[in-house]
Amino acid sequence: MEQAHSLLLNEDACSRLGEHQRAEFVFEWLRFLKKLLPVADRADVKQNQKRLVEQLTTILTGSPGPSTRWLLAHCLALLYRVGDSFTSSLTVGRCNDIIRSKDDSPSFLPSRLAAVACLGAMYEQLGRLLISSFKETMANLLKALKGAESQGRYEIMLCIEKILKGLGVSAVPCHRDIFKATRTCLTDRSMAVRCAAAKCLLELQREAVFLWSTELENVASLCYRAFEGSNYDVRIAVSRLLGTLLASSLEPKQAIAPRPGSRRSCLEEVMELVSSGFLRGCAGFLRASGDLLKGTNSVSRDVRVGITQACVVFISTLGGAWLEAHFPSLLSLLMDLVSHTRATQNPVDAVCSRRCVSFILRASVGSLLGEKAQIAAAKEICQAISKQNRAVDIALCEGNVETRVSNTDVAASQHVLVCALLELGSVLQDLGSSAVPLLHDASTGMLDTVISVLLHPSVSARLAAAWCLRCVAIAIPAQLAVLLDRCSERLNALKSCPKAVAGYSAAIAALLGAVQHCPLGIPHIKGKVVMGLAEDLLRSAAQNSRISIQRTQGGWLLLSALMTLGPTVVEHHLPRMLLLWKCAFPQSVKELDSELRRGDSFTWQVTLEGRSGALCAMKNLVVHCKVLLSDDVICRVLPLLSCAVALLTQLSSLVKSYGNQLKNAVTVFRLRVYEILALLPPKTYEECFDTVLKQLWHDLTGPENMACAELSLLPTLCHNQDLALLGPALQDMDQQYIEEQLHGGSIGGGTLEYDPFTIFVKAQVVPAPLPPPAALTVAAVQLFGVIFPHLTIQQRAQVLEQFCECVRLLKGARQQTVQVHATTAFCCTLKGLALDHETLGPEEVQKPGLSLLLGALESSNPLLRCVSAEGLARLAQVLNEPNFTVSLSLMSFDKLKIARDAITRTGHSLALGCLYRYMGGISSPQHLSACVGVLFTLSQDNTSPEVQMWSLHSLSMVVDLAGPLYRSHIDASLTLVLRLLLLTPHTHVEVQQSLGRCLNALITSLGPDLQGEGAGVCAVRTSCLVGCAVMQDSPDCLVQAQAITCLQQLHMFSPRHVNLASLVPSLCEILLDYSVLVNLCSLYLSLRRAVVACLRQLAQRETVEVSEHAVALVKELPRRDNTQLDVTIKEVGLEGALFSLLDRESDPRLRQDIKDTLVQMMSSAAESELAHWLKLCKDVLSASSDLAATTLVETNQEEDADDSSAFHAKHEHSGPFNNLRWSTRVFAVECVCRIIVQCESGDPAHFDMVLAQEQRLHESTDFLVLHLADLVRMAFMAATDHSVQLRLAGLQMLLLIIHKFASVTEPEFPGHVILEQYQAIVGAALRPAFSADAPPDVTAKACQVCSAWITSGVVSDLRDLRRVHQLLASSLVKVQGGRDVPNPFYNESTFTMETLAVLKAWAEVYIVAVQSTRQKESPAWWHQEQQQEQCEDPGTAETAGSGLLKLVQGDLATLSRLWLAALQDHALLTLPPTYASQLPTTGGSFYSAEIMEQAHQHYCFAWAPILHATALWLNSTEFIMVDEGPANLSRPVTPTSMGQSTTLASIKSPEDVNTERLHLILGISVEFLCSPHSQNQMENITSCLHALQALLDVPWPRSKVGNDQALTVELLSVLHRLIVTREYPGVQLAVLELVRQVVCAAQEHVREKRHSAEVDDGAAEKETVPEFGEGRDTGGLVPGKSLVFGAMELCLCILVRKLPQLSPRLAGSPTGQGALPWSLNDSDCKLVTLALCILSELPSICSPEGSVSVLPTVLYLLLGVLKELVRGFVAANRGILVSGALQALRNVLSSPMSRAEKSRAAWVEFLRSALSTLLECWDTDKMEPVEDEETLLTALTIFLLSASAEVITVEPLQSLCVGKFQASLESKDPMLLSRSYQLLASVFQGPTAVAGPFIQALGGQLVGYLQQVEKSRPQTATELQAVQDGVRAMEALVLAAEETHRPQLVTVLLPILVSFLLDENTLASAPAASRSLHESALRDLMRIGPQHSAVFKTLMASAPHMKARLEAAIKGNQESVSAKATPRQVSGKHIPSIQLKTNFL
């Protein structure tokens, strides 16, 4: 293919190829030429133009295929436009000659079509340059059109369209001729020709004014005829034409000047024209008159659906502004249309007409109007409803007096009301909570208007009004309870009026259905009210026969709707329900027989209605409350069902006896029986199988019910892949709502009045139940599928044989209907068997079943063929016998060999593809080859496009099923697909669609192999790309969608071979062309889905490239219609266009894809284009009509003037966005939150103003903190909007901003944070959420924001903080009212949610307040606040605390009680179900018994901070109960009350109360920490641990815990599990701290017991330690019962995880010694230190024997850690680790157990061993060299000083210890030397027995070292420190000596000190260290001299040189300090100024 990439065609290479390869080669060359010509050098093009024209002309005459000829035409025209156009007329003439040729052979046809295509392209590109030959060409084309076949007519229409486009106004002379020719093609038998003609006329109308003026009526009539028998494509194209013409007639385009004879129409005239077509169709005068006389209607549904779409185009073309201005007139005209009698002559027509008008309203109001305009439109609709209702009321009133109201008037009004009410409901659902102003508008009176329709005589109007009320409740949940109350009251008041009973019961049922969409629910009492109403209606039904039916229907309707409230509501009413059901049915079959012998038609009608309603209630119980179906309930219901089934057999006799008036009631009754039986387990009603089976057989095959609901039956059993064979699926259409009218056959579409019991189902759109006969068929099929697997083999075979026989005997339409019923029933059975993995049965069952499916496989109904093919696949799956599957394949092969009819060939070809669908794929190469061979042959059958389509579709499935096995057929398949793509005419788009599916399957089969670079792979990849290019050029949208999907697959497997530069612009062109009228005229939903899905994938990898290509396209692309989306892309890029698209789309799948695309683009480019994305989101958020205007006014009333300016910003309606919906704005806020979170993981400068400003100076980067003002503003705008969802999103965003920016400092104002300046905005954003009418979920979220703001530390002024604090305080007051004052609008659980949110917020504030007061380094502003308060009143400042604590302190008494109550509730709700009987019957403090399940979720959200706060409060009070007075609660809420009132007998002591509180907190914490569900709840785990720590900080709970060994052991077990399962450092530190506290508590307990024993035993026993503690006499520690063992286990876990080297098992492992150096971070160091601290305390809580058991382990771990430390261990905080280990060692050595009589000997032995181990650490032969000898010496010193003398004084330990010090004193390291002398000084001061040997051995060495200093003075600070420490050691030696020996030692010391002194000459030039030594020695002499004055004087006298040296030093020092003040004397190591106090001379 590379040889095709040249300017001229490589004819040599082309000639060497075969015919098919040559076509592909030519196409690829033309593709390249199309891209090359616009960018090629013009001189080169002119130079080669002649040769190029010759080559292109040769291709033209060489019979090119459809795609090739279009590409050829484009290249030829492009060549003349780029090069010389002089010879273009010759080419035109040549084309005209070819068209005029008389050659009619099939081989010449492609050349003629190519010539036509070339003419069109040349005229389009060259325009007026060819004007001279225009008339001749046009005459030639029009003449050829008359005798052309369908392909010719199609091409000529497209050619004329292009000619018109190129010539523009110059083509006016031929406009009339073109119109005459085109009008014929508009009604052509070929649908493709009709589409092309419509496009041609659409182009013609741009200049041909007569089309939308004088000829408008004729063109409209022509369009109506075009709609007759049309398909979806035709309706789209013709409706676009008609709609555009109507819009042009009303508002001509300004660019076109008015012409003579043209006039402008008015809206009434246009709508009259539409109405005439809608009411009379396309019939001529005579036919219309004849139909009128006969009373028939000739208007087909095709025409009405087409006209409806045209109306939508008409309105959309005029635009939203026009619609807003003319909506009242348009609404009136549409209402007149739907009220016309010709539109509603029968129920099916009435439903169709209503749907059409509703679709027009929905598509216009729902898509074109913004929220403000929608509110205005809703008011107009309300007025229309009111007008109709008044007219009916007047007619009824007049009828009571003079005349009776006519049925026609009522019927007309009902259809108007249905359309208006349904649209009003839809508008309200769109608006959501933004519709609140509409409800409060007194002039409109919307609710009164809608409720008044509930009394309308028509059932359809009443149901529509009920549905509208349901929409009100969904939009504004606060209205739900209000409307329920209102309707209940009216029903009670008017229960004698039949219309009122029917209307209000329907309204209540609809409102109950709305509860499923309202998370806040309704008060629980409403269920009781509805139950009472239903009972009342049912009891009183028999009292008045006039309203018996209405009351019966109404009662059961209410009960059925009640079931949707769920089991929590229904379980309270179930006993009464069972009683009502019992009353509705006879108690036995005998009673049923007696019923049949009496009664009349009316009685039976009431009875059947009642029983149908009862069965419906049962069905809804099963659906919504399955948990209530206990065995007892089923046993009580089954007898009733048996009677219902028995009655089924008598229904036909009832109809015969009482006539057809019972027929509908009988049908509904049978339907209800089937529905409930299908839901129950078949085993429960096995005895009824025979009866039920007979009825099912009768309903599926009998003549009475021939309603074949194909659309409901067949598609559900088809595979989704196979539905593509039937054209665009309904779910892939924007017009599904009206298009499905055309698929319903004679029954038409569904509507609500067919089954009023569907009004409460969970759905966003109004339900459309089928007519009862059709619904009965569907239910019968489903029940058959449920029952069949439970039949015996004989019954199965008999039923299937009867089905086959019945189908065989019947003829005509009835045979087709029965065949559909029987096949679907069997396929439903097979599907159930396959899903349940059950078998069908032996051959006697298989044979009739197979026969049934094979018969359907050759049915003329294509949908039935698809179902039967799927049935065969399911049959193969159920039987799972390879031989059977192979035999089916062979049978299909045989059939396909001999069959020549299309039906048989299509059915069996599809069966081949489906057979292995559920068998795991095709595994046999032979079978695969056979299938491929047959399907290849069928797919090349040019005589039957239908066979081609089905066989290619089957081939695509075979490719999928074969998987890798298909690789051998890939090349042949690609060749076939590509050849067919190039040859298939564009009129056969269905074949192209199947080819697209084949290509997609082939690409998937190739997969990642497409990335290869081999010659074969490159050829395959090129073929795939060529195939995609062919499909991209197709005019059919579904084929284009296939092309995009294939390219998407190619991009996934081989991204670098897909050219984004061409793909992205093509995708965007589709959006630009079709998105002007999104939802309606964007042509194909499936195409838009494909485009957005592809963009989503591209955005994941190449976001920047996609955006750049999109913007470049819009900037460069010349367009005549500059759409709004073009402007959007130009201004804000592709992402802005996607936001616009998101706002206008309604398809959920497409909306999700758009959101995903935006999220992908944002995650890739948000940081690099931060300002752009934030501006985009801000524009989207600001694009609303009146955003937060009211809120701004309200919030500013209480703010200061200087604050208000901060948030009184103007709303900028910038950019292309205008009046976006709230859902789009919510998504924009979510996008901003995503950006903030994304930036958190990026550059730190995003949250650091200083860093951001610095980097901004050097780089052109952007940071989030620089846009903080915009972020806060966006959050404020969202939080104060009318929409509740937007308010919640805004508050969440505000919360995120506070969390992320609270600590960002303000560089310009040090000591302040950047958020401080926005405190007024934050307060204003929060205030509306605390208003009285704010929904509870908004208030709950606002409480969360309040606590975050208060605790963030942003606000430094408590007066400012009180603004937000007051909001929380007001909520607390509301909470104190308790649940006894319920919210009248929402469920009681909302009170729980709001209460817990408030308590949680207060708890978080209190926690931070307490923690901030406990911090040693609090912020400066807290110190200032404390100082101010202490100055005012020191006493109160100390008690009430400071800062935040002062804010909370006033409410702490109330809060503590509320917190305790909440914790008690939570504890009760977390009890296992087995304890349910022990729960309080009335509920808890903040929940009632009815809402336990909902309340539990809210407690789970809030309990942890409340627990922590309660523990802190108890800590602050130290469990001392203070009577703080009543807390103004409606009920006692302390844990002692247990939900009941406190009596005198139940008053408990403070001790008991405190114990309960302690156990409450302990129990909740331990229960949660044990829960496996606490996986991702680190915050809650930390709260539990901190709460327990706060408790154990107080003596009383510590004593309680210490006294309970079992409790402490269990607690340690839980904590051990936590350590093992949670790696979070904060949790592990908290666990160890808590363990330390537990050990402390045990220590205190043991200490107290020992002290008590000592006191009791008297003074004589004091020398011995009482034997308390673990271990007792034996020393044994029992695992699971020992606190010490548990603590050791936990500490060991930590130590071994952090230091694996400690474990003997791990010592040689890769993580042990042989591994890389282990390193610990800061938290790890803290963990190890804490573990060692705990270990060191354990011996003290053991008995003497127990301590002996523990000691070896403790010493091993301590010394093990020390060993690792001295080996140069890497640790972030080594200092804390070393000090902790040494302190732990000191604790162990000084333990009282070491001195206990019973354990002293063992301790001495163990400690000696430990000392020996420690000394071995110096032994370099056994381990690595010691790197930290200082730590070892310190540990050795601790041993020497803390252990008893008998441990140390034995040999050889003592000598070894002395030796270590001797070695260290010989070290050349001054640091080690310094530390050694420090430690030696400590040893010298130790016990004599220990110090003596060290003095004797090391004294001389010390003196020698000091005497050498004079010769080698210190040069560095460390050397100086070593000398000074040596002097201190010498001083210690002096002090340790006996009094008699001290003078001798002083005599040694003083000369040494004098030797350190320098003379005054040397002093000035001496180094700093030497000078410091001089000064230090002089100070020491001044200090020591007076202490030993006699020795000093004697020494000075005997050594004059020393005296002179000292005097000189003193004199020099006096001179240097003479100018200084008298120095203060500093003891210790501080250096004081020298002050002479003694005259040494």
Image: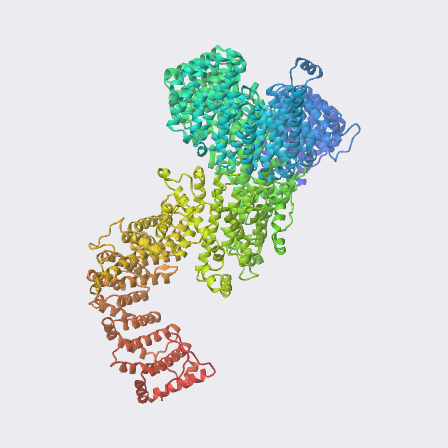
Asked if residue 162 shows in the view, the reply is: no
Q: Is residue 687 above or below residue 1941?
A: above
Residue 272, position as x, y percentages in the image: 71, 25
Q: Is residue 74 left or right of residue 691?
A: right
Point out residue 771 in the picture as x, y percentages from the top left corner.
54, 21
Closer to the camera in the image, 1628 or 250: 1628
Screen quadrant of the N terminus? top right
**Which residue reaches farthest right?**
260
Q: How many marks?
A: 0
Residue furthest out toward the front = 1544
Q: Quadrant of residue 116?
A: top right
Q: Is residue 1439 above or below residue 600?
A: below
Q: Where 1828 sits versus 1551, above or below?
A: below
Residue 1318 on image: x %, y %: 57, 54
Q: Is residue 1548 above or below residue 1222?
A: below
Tell me: 1850 left or right of 1057.
left
Taking depth in this image into account, of 543 and 1959 the one nearest to the observer is 543
Q: Is residue 1226 left or right of residue 1690?
A: right
Residue 1218 seen in this snapshot: yes
Rendered-image quadrant of the C terminus: bottom left
Query: What colour scheme was applied to this rendering of the protein?
Result: rainbow
Quarter-of-image position of residue 837: top left
Closer to us: 1729 or 169: 1729
* Front-lying residue, 738 or 1354: 1354
Query: Could you tell me residue 1869's position as x and y percent?
Result: 34, 70
